[in-house]
Structure formats: C-alpha cells, structure tokens
Amino acid sequence: MSNRATTRRRQSYRRGHRGETLAAMALRLKGFRILECRYRTRLGEIDLIARRGDLVLIVEVKARPTLAEAMEAIRRESERRIEGAADLWLARQPDYGRLAVRFDMVAVLPWRWPVHVENIFQGRN
C-alpha cells in the first residue's frame, strides 16, 4: 500500500473517531447514557449504542460536508449490517422484552453541532 493511501486511511480513521466522540457528547447532553462505542460483532459494527430509560438507540455516525450527504451514506447494505449487529447485542440484554429500539444517525458536519436524525431507517422488528 502506498504512503498516500496509508495517510488517507489514518486521517479517515481519526476523523471518524472524532465524529463518534462529538456524537456521543451530543447524545449525553440529551440525557442518553452511552453503553457501547464501536461495538463489533461478526456481522458488523455499531458506532454507538445509547440508552435513556427503556429506549435504546442504535446510532450510525457519519462525518460529511452536508446533512444530505450524511443521510445518503447509509445504504441498504449498511442497514442490514447494523440490524444484524443490533440483534446480537439485544439478545444479550436481560431486559430485552421491554426495550424500545430505534435506529438513528448523528451527522457530524463542518463547523456545526452534530445533527441527531431519529429513525434514519426502520429495523425489521
């Protein structure tokens, strides 16, 4: 791999990590507790899992120049991957039966506070 590609990948990783940190901060200010960051399973990764009462948010974080670009970045394949990982996480929760689950997105945009978009897609349930 070229030096340029390695540098680009490293910058992208750092930008994503910063975006997830900002997204977590924004959700905490809304009263959510962050349960997981970068939750990895064999089916995929969930950027953030947050909870307030019985509401669990499965959150995809996108750092893009515009809100429209962030929303367009979540494709059907991403939805399936996120749903599969969410199913694995939820199966391990002792109070699973009473939880309400929502799939949200937090868009991290240049020079703006993160934008929380509720119900970016509907899960299978």
Image (spheres, grey):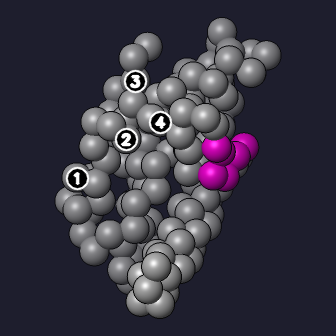
The CA distance from mark 3 to mark 1 is: 17 Å
In this rendering, would 59 be left or right of 77? Answer: right
Q: What stretch is highlighted in magenta?
A: 35-40
Which residue carries the number 3 mark? 123
**Three-letter amino acid code at disc 2?**
Ser
Which residue carries the number 2 mark? 78
Q: Look at 47% across and 28% down and name the residue there.
A: 83
The CA distance from mark 2 to mark 4 is: 6 Å
Q: Nearer the viewer, residue 45 or 118?
A: 45
The CA distance from mark 2 to mark 1 is: 11 Å
The secondary structure type at the circle numbered 3 is loop
Q: Is residue 57 magenta?
A: no
- Residue 117: horizontal and vertical position, in percent? 36, 48
Q: Would residue 47 be visible to someone looking at this image?
A: yes
Which secondary structure is most common in the magenta stretch? strand
Between disc 4 and disc 3, whose residue precedes? Answer: 4
- Residue 82: horizontal and vertical position, in percent? 47, 36
Which residue carries the number 1 mark? 72
Do the residues under discs 2 and 4 have CB atoms within 8 angstroms? yes
**Quarter of the image that includes the C terminus:** top left
The label shown at residue 101 is none
Mark 2 vs mark 1, foreground winner is 2
The label shown at residue 82 is 4
Between disc 4 and disc 1, whose residue precedes? Answer: 1
Q: Look at 74% across and 15% down and name the residue there.
A: 95
Packing grade of label 1 (10 A; few <14, some 14-19, many >=20) is few
Packing grade of label 2 (10 A; few <14, some 14-19, many >=20) is some
**Three-letter amino acid code at disc 3?**
Gly
Q: Look at 29% across and 59% down and name the residue there.
A: 70
Q: Would residue 22 be visible to someone looking at this image?
A: no
